[in-house]
Image (tube, helix red, strand yellow):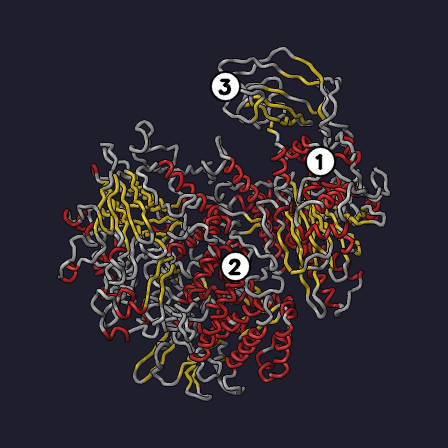
Amino acid sequence: MHRAAVKALRTTLQCTAWGLRSSRRGPSTALSKLTKQNFSTSRHLSSSTSPIRPRPHVLGEPLRSSMYIRRTSFALVSVLVGYGAWYSYNGTNTDAVVRSYSKARTATGADAVPTRSVLVIGADELHTGTFVGEGPISKATGSDGQMVVEMLSPDQATQKLRKMEESYFVNRGRGVVRYDVNQLPSNSPIEDDHVEKIVEMKGAGAARDWMFWGVFDGHSGWATSAKLRQALVSVVGGELNETYKAANGMAPAPEAVDAAIKAGFLRLDDEIVHHSVQKVLQAKNKMLAAEMLAPAYSGSCALLSFYDSDSKLLRVACTGDSRAVLGRKSASGKWTATPLSVDQTGSNPDEAARVRKQHPGEEPVRNGRILGGLEPSRAFGDASYKWTREIVESLSPQFFGRPPKLLLKTPPYVTAEPVVTTTKIEPEKGDFVVMATDGLWEMLTNEEVVGLVGKWIESQASSTGNQQFNSVWNRLFGSKGELPVEESKHSQADDPDGQRSPEALLRRRGLSPAKDRFVVQDKNVATHIVRNALGGSNQEQVSALLTLPSPTSRRYRDDLTVQVIFFGNGEKNGEIVLNKEATADSKTALPSRDLRTAVTMVVFDHHEYLTEEEKRLKEDRNRVKYWKKWGPYVAERQWATVREDYSADGDAWSHFPHDHARSRTYRWGEDGIAGVCDTHGLQNIAFAFWNEKDPFLKERLFGLSNPQGNHGESIKEAHFHLDNTPHSYMKYLYKYPQRAFPYEDLLKENAKRTKEDSEYQILDTGVFDDDRYWDIFIETAKEDDDPDELLFRVTAWNRGPEPAPLHIIPHVWFRNTWSWGRESQDKKPSLGYHDENLVKSNHHSLGDRYFLLSPSPGVGPSGQDVQPELLFTENDTNVDLLYGGKNEQPYVKDAFHRYIVDGEKGAVNPAKTGTKSAAWYSFNEAGGVNPGECAVVRFRISKRGDNFLDEEEFDDMIEKKREEADGFYYHISPLPMADDLRNIQRQAFAGMMWCKQHYLFIWEEWANGDPSQPPPPACRKGIRNSAWRHLHCDDILSMPDSWEYPFFAAWDTSFHCITLAMIDPDFAKKQLDLFTREWYCHPNGQLPAYEWNFGDVNPPVHAWATFRVFKIERKLYGRQDLDFLERVFQKLLMNFTWWVNRKDVDGKNVFEGGFLGLDNIGLFNRSEPLPTGGTLEQADSTGWMAFYCLNMLNIALELAKHRRIYEDIATKFFEHFILISDAMTWRMGQKDEQSLWNEQDGFYYDAISWGGPWIQQLPVRSLVGLIPLYATLTLEPELINRLPSFKRRVEWFINNRSDVAERTMHSIAKRGKGNRILLSLVSKDRLVKILERMLDEDEFFSPHGIRSLSKYHKDHPYSMEVNGQMFRVGYVPGDSDSGLFGGNSNWRGPIWLCVNFLLVESLQRFYLYFGQELQVECPVGSGDMMHLGHVSEEIQHRLQHLFARGDDGRRSINGGSDILDFDPNWRDYLWFYEFFDGDNGRGLGATHQCGWTGLIARMIHDTGINCRLPQTPRTPSVGMSHYFDDILHRHVGGAQTPRSPVMSMSPNMPRLRRSSTTRSIAARSDFDTNDLNGYDDEADGSFPARKGSVAYPGMSAGDADRLRERQEADSHLHTYITQKLEKVRLEQAADGYGEGEEFEAHASD
């Protein structure tokens, strides 16, 4: 922090103007020297009415900067008048390049000349003047160091001044009525920071508020001040809390309170300065050093106020030279200014004496600075004044190369210990406090600041502003004239205590201290103070100081941060309300539990900036525009689903096979490739292709049915979900072979293979050999302002060595709703030819829409464009082909296949009308598309009947939407991480979006058939789902997999919602809400499982997901949806009751449950009666129910904070959990009985029970024994104390159910980390024993996560013979060797992300209780001891290594495939498998299981920043460069991360082709290496400047405003990144892990 010198801004003087020779050529006029003309003026900037007086001045007289030499009297300001246009100030040699530009005019009429005010900035002086001419003013600096910038107008200056203002009404009736804040940067980014926090404290007496305000003046960077903003209040608050608790309900001694504040300051500074260096020296990692040492190397002053509403005492703690001043009315009626802090600098005699006393024999204070360098004598950070010479020397060679200071001998020379003052506030008298960084006090005196506030109060009291606030002030002061201020007791010279007056500085500025220079024109009092500090009524000076760009502005003013707190007794409703009229438009209320925000955006640094996609989500949420009306809701497989099964035996796979799909109409949905439809699946758009080799069109993805595959159903295609926002931009890649698709080969070879063999995949067929395939990229985008305007672009790249033909056939059709006798024929939709390349569609609910196609550039020597041929038919079944019957009309569903492939010209409707249409593009001239070139198809679905498509605008819009997608996802995960991880996360997010699907199922219509169709077999109703008659589904749902599982699964959906909540929390909440609604949830309370058997039992994870989504939304988006939480909780009460009644029939609190989603994990089929007789008591089922109990308890406690009635239900779940926990060990209450816990093995097992104490354990070490770990929860003591009824009941239970408490509630008596209470199924001893097995790499601990079955069973399988039949469980790390549950999933060894995710969270919750006290060996046998936080992190890192590249360039999921790992056209695309091989991590099962496997995106978000990857190409510049140069290098138009290959194409790739019909022949460019497909990927990975994303000539005012908003958001994002990195650093330095704020209810939320 260098103090900004206050420069003189005075015009004088004699200046020189150059005459300019005019020319009739106008804009091309050149500047030319003419004879010098000398004249004199004197215009004082502080007064617009000053007379103009001649004053001699010698040109060339040197002017020195006052930045370092304060004795310089003033700088000179001249008036520069110039003619011409594009002006670069270059001394006496000036040239002009003129461009068209106009602002103001110096004359009227056609010959009027535009003029503007300019500021000429020299090395030591400023000039203001008028610029005459057109064109932008260059900001280039000339050789003489001067540059010219256009002066801000008064309105622009006010806009900049108000940009960061905030104001809040505090309607809590506890002594504070309002506070205002504003900041004005001089540094870029601003080094100041601030914090405001109100905490409600509840104890034995009445509730009170602790209110904190802080300003932090950073220097040498912003990292320290940002850290203080994040942590100081929490640390000090914790110390105060301990002090108040130690007083046992009495008021603590004043000295104790002061000591607590000081202890908090010193503790945090110790973490910043000393803990960080310890970690860095141990790790010896430069990246870690950059993260951890930034706040230590920089520094910050701190001024923190603490107001206790009960005692009305205000304590001000000051470290450094920021200042607090109290304004109070005296008996005389005047305002008095009382400083509440003392500037602590080397210029303060007391401070200088203190420092000298601590360092005898040295001269630690030189020229008023510590060691001659640092002005503040107390500060946070500034480690170079606190570290020993040995530490500095050890850091220098390894990291930053900074040598120790020459005078450094006996550090520390600087301390963070504050000076604390205490003041009794009198709210009834209208006291106020002004807190500000030193930049303000250099420009205004204490009395002036207090007087300015008083004058503002008088103005507000007489205005028509906020009546609530004004009524308080009118009651206190009335409306008076000029408000006097008591004279200062000190002279205008510097005070002896170091609090300096700015009088000398004012004189140097040429400003009069007269009060008439002050004005009142702002609603925010902090803004009002800052304006008057800059010049007040002298608008020219205000504009000049605000025009100065950084870093030049630092010569003239410092960063300014001002807080004003008004005390009083106002309205009392418990709320904190945003004062909108005194808050900048870009600001919204800070997220807190008392202030409900209604925004949908990611919040950084308490700054809420909506990316373009977030703005659309907000409009959709508020029902302004229906942005989600159209999305990727078309299934990838509709055939062979239960909904389409009308068979007598329930064999869905055989009833509707793949071969029927092209000819047979679906009843309940549609499918297609990269399909898009409306939210009810009425109108669909998808794509078909033909390579002239296949026997039929590629209209849908191919795969094997369950009976055809050796491991069940399996897709046999190569496609990737590359990008998707919800849903303005979508990108899909389909790899289409140029050879004949190997349908028969895939069928026959898989039929030969056994369950011990691996699956035969499409890559195994050789169809992609020699790169003979197409990369077909399909992109969909929406217009800026209209969600009904859909743009589609298909770009097909020939990757092969020879020209190849390709036919691209986009389809638009209606789902058949007219053939079932449930809709009148007049509502039948239609599609028909409307104009050339234009199809019109009509639907009774969707209205008229148009399908507009653009000709495509040709691929052959003729140069002719490819014109689409429009085809029409009906979406009706080809009864003749399939069943030998007669078609009611000749044009049926498979017409396009017959027309294009078979050449059957009569197949399509010559009348060009129907319910299904297509556009046939043939790229086959001269053999087709050349190698390395592409075919492009563009079309639009619109409500407009335009008959022309501008391809350039079309492509620009798609590129813009891609950029907006970059920005959207970057804002979700802005922290630095490896490029590869960011790419993985982005594709995982995309997969979550592409797996959305319109799901239609109405049981009544499905079971009984349709009026116009033959009735289904009567026996069909009894086959499945007969008890689910109430089901009526017509919604967009998140599917587990887009092809293999095109139906919902209840527990899968819960996991989906964790990742979905990061992108679109409203959609995530809707999913969870739907399953509890009456048209899904059974009347008995059961949630539907999945369509093959809705009555099956899935693990009860719905409550967990509900609370997690609630917490994620609150943390990431700054709002809490209590209505959602309460609504779902009420329905889950019914579901919980169903579980208790149906799965604990005997009331023992030990549960059965069936297969519980774990398919073949057990010895027996757990969904069927046991062959042994008896019942299966399941450790996992009981663990799940305990887990369910605790999540319901968590939700109840959260709701109880707002509605006390929920304390009762919280008590119920607390007691029920304790009883389950007891039964898990003591089934019948007898201590000598055997239960589910095996003490010898240290593990939980399932057990067969024959009643009473007779049970037999089944010693299979599987996830069944790990799931009890899920049931753990920590309770904050503050939360319990806040809920007295719940607290009393807990205490009663301990005292009155001692039999249970003694056995299971060991943690109640013993408190853990943070004085938390632990509720857990497992004791500490059992936890350690289970972890010994779980973390053993020869058992559960794989290099890629936790296995589902212990590897111990590889050599020790468990078997049991029952009635001559042998049942056996062994370790099977890969595909299943069993046919249980279809045989397409395996829980006997592979790794599943969903259960790993819950284990990770459980370990984190245990860590919240045990802290570093509990450490275990990880892995077992390694000798490495870790606390449980680090163990959870280690598991997450191993899971990330499934996807991330290793040192050898391979991804584990690819199973050693060279093409997937190394081919440049494959290696960056990923499949998200259902589960993974327990030994090598190879992907298994469904390939697009972006449901729970999408959880990897969340793990990367949480731990990707410190994931130890063996190959990290480059740390994104946005994450790290700011540590070294304070510049955020992120392009404002998109995410400045190294470009993921998903979002880019090859640098050698030609630009997209455009047809000659939409551009002139001369302008047509089919191959341009300078325009790389619209991308321009530079070597350094940075983004190019694109139209619409950066400033460019002709930019509209709206674009410029949006650009400024983005730039401000970047600054706050910069701060956010720093805070998060610093949090990681402090957590690692302190105890190595976070506080799990998403896992539990907190009193302070």
Residue topped by disc 3: 27
Residue 186 coordinates in the image, percent (x, y)? 65, 38
Question: At numbered mark 1, what does the secondary structure look like: helix, strand or loop?
Answer: loop
* Image vertical order of residue 1305 relative to residue 286, above or below: below
Residue 887 visible, this orientation: yes
Q: Nearer the viewer, mark 1 or mark 2?
A: 1
User: Which label number is shown at residue 1112?
Assistant: 2
Residue 1287 coordinates in the image, percent (x, y)? 63, 74
Residue topped by disc 1: 536
In-image side of 977 versus 476 (left or right):
left
Question: At numbered mark 3, what does the secondary structure look like: helix, strand or loop?
Answer: helix
Quarter residue 1568 falls in? top left
Q: Earlier in the sequence, mark 1 or mark 3?
A: 3
Between marks 1 and 2, how big is the CA–CA gap? 45 Å
Amino acid found under the numbered disc labelled 3: Pro
Identify which residue, 1465 or 212, lies in the foreground: 212
